[in-house]
Amino acid sequence: MKRIVLNSAVSRLTLIFTLLFVSGIVQNASAQELITIRQAIEETLNNNLQVKQSKLSESLSDEDLKQSRAALLPTLNGNGSYNINFGRSVDPSTNQFNSEKFSSFNGGLSTGVDLFQGFQKLNQIRQNKLLLDAGKTNTEKVKNDLILQVITSYMQILYNKDFLVAAKQQLAVAQQQLKQQQELLDVGNKTLADLAESKSQVATAELDVTTAENALTISYLTLAQLMDIPSSTKYVVQAPDISSFSNASAVYNPEEIYASALGLFPDIKLAALRTEASKKAVDIAKGNYYPSLSLGAGLNTNYSSGRTSFVGVTPAGFDTVGFTRTGNDPVLAPRFNTLTKGYRFKDQIKDNFGQYVGFSLQIPIFNGLRARTAVRKAKISYMQSQTDEQLAKNNLNKVIYQAVADLKAAQSTFESTSKTFVARKESFSVIEQRYNVGLVNSLDYSTSQTNRNKAEIDMIRAKYDLLFKSKLIDYYLGKQIEF
């Protein structure tokens, strides 16, 4: 009669402890921010540095595209130089030697435009457009990969939460059992071996709780780092209703999922764009085989402080330049003084103003096989891109078929583990009742409790594995991830 009353008291205490524990969880959760899977994904995509890095790379590609378009426009450059000359030097305005100190200025404008260059600039624009699209698609790929990481981390938190709850419940049972064994030992109905076994069960349960707490802390930190929020942030995640995924595996056809994913999955789009960009690189390299024709024009002028302007002449007498043959009379020639004045800056700039226009034609004849080598290397890169694209398609096909098979297996595993847990739980309940009245030894009781705990953990793991595999299919279909 005493054992029956004691067993009833233990059951009541266990029930009270469980209710208090669950109530404490609810109160603690209410004081923290509740984050859904959708919120976790949005927070990650808005804050994660990998997304920001990819967007910056995208901006660089956009600048490359703008630059390649601007390369079609004519160039315009101005030049000017000012010099002070000492000693014997050439006056740039007269092209004569001058031994006096003078200053000079040269200035001009030049413009040029490529009329034909083997269509290299046009093909460069097309390639940069493809590379910009590839950059945008790479950003989507980064986001897509992060979504999968968030789903994985979110599921891990849910699993670790349930695992911790189960571990604490088992610790409570083990502690109550230890208390019961002590009371039974005190009245002579149990041995020290039974008490030692109960203490061992409590120690094992405490270790399981510590392990579960550490795992839950790490999983919260992992998700917080993905969302790029402070690691000290306190939050809880929303648990889904597993019943809505009970028959998920029956509605998916892997070939249909693959056909849909080919047009949606960023990895495939990115590989295809890179292939097209590599193809354009071949056309750019082939442009080196063609002649190039360019048009150039310019304006120029100069000034020199050593240059003077002519004013006129004045008579300065006569000079004897010779004698006559017959009378030896002197032959005179008039002498004149040249009058000059300083040549003003604006007058020199105006008078020395010149213009030019011309064409330049370059015909490649032999350049050390550089053009041919560049074309061959571009073709090899193009073939590599084609291979990478096909590998991406093959890998997507493989993972989708694997995901569908894994989902079916997860469904079966969850159903099996659920049945096993129910059976183990009922078996342990019977063993516990018999153990309390001395009909079962401590070894059989410990084995039954271990089997029951393992079955519960297996069921929890299978439950979240089923949910994860179901969401993985939605991920490949490009659906919004919701619980």
Image (cartoon, rainbow, N blue to C red):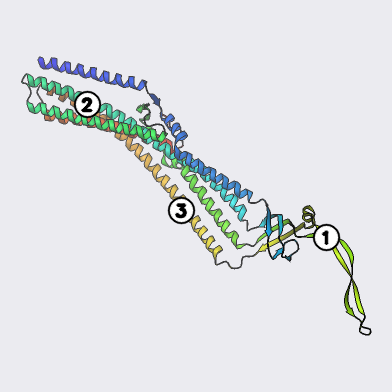
Callouts 2 and 3 close, C-beta under 8 Å: no
User: Can you see residue 467?
Assistant: no
Distance from the alpha carbon under mark 3 to that under mark 1? 81 Å
**Looking at numbered disc 1 in the image, what kind of residue is underneath it?**
Thr
- Near mark 3 (Cα within 10 A), the count class, few <14, some 14-19 or many ≥20, is some
How many marks do you count on the picture?
3
Q: Which residue is mark 2?
A: 170
Q: Which residue is mark 1?
A: 340
**Looking at numbered disc 2 in the image, what kind of residue is underneath it?**
Gln
Distance from the alpha carbon under mark 2 to that under mark 1? 116 Å
Horizontal and vertical percent position of residue 96: 74, 66
468 vs 20: above or below: below
Residue 53 shown left or right of residue 164 in the figure: right
Whichever of labels 2 and 1 marks the residue nearer the N terminus, that label is 2
Horizontal and vertical percent position of residue 59: 54, 43
User: Can you see residue 153?
Assistant: yes
Quadrant location, the C terminus? top left
Q: Secondary structure at mark 2?
A: helix
- Near mark 2 (Cα within 10 A), the count class, few <14, some 14-19 or many ≥20, is many
472 vs 236: above or below: below
Residue drawn 79% across and 57% down? Answer: 343
Whichever of labels 2 and 3 marks the residue nearer the N terminus, that label is 2
Task: Identify the image quadrant of residue 168.
Answer: top left
Query: Comparing marks 2 and 1, which lies closer to the viewer?
Result: 1
Horizontal and vertical percent position of residue 332: 91, 75
Residue drawn 46% across and 44% down? Answer: 267
Q: Which residue is mark 3?
A: 387
Query: Comparing marks 2 and 3, which lies closer to the viewer?
Result: 2
Query: Comparing marks 3 and 1, which lies closer to the viewer?
Result: 1
Distance from the alpha carbon under mark 2 to that under mark 3? 54 Å
Q: Residue furthest right?
A: 327
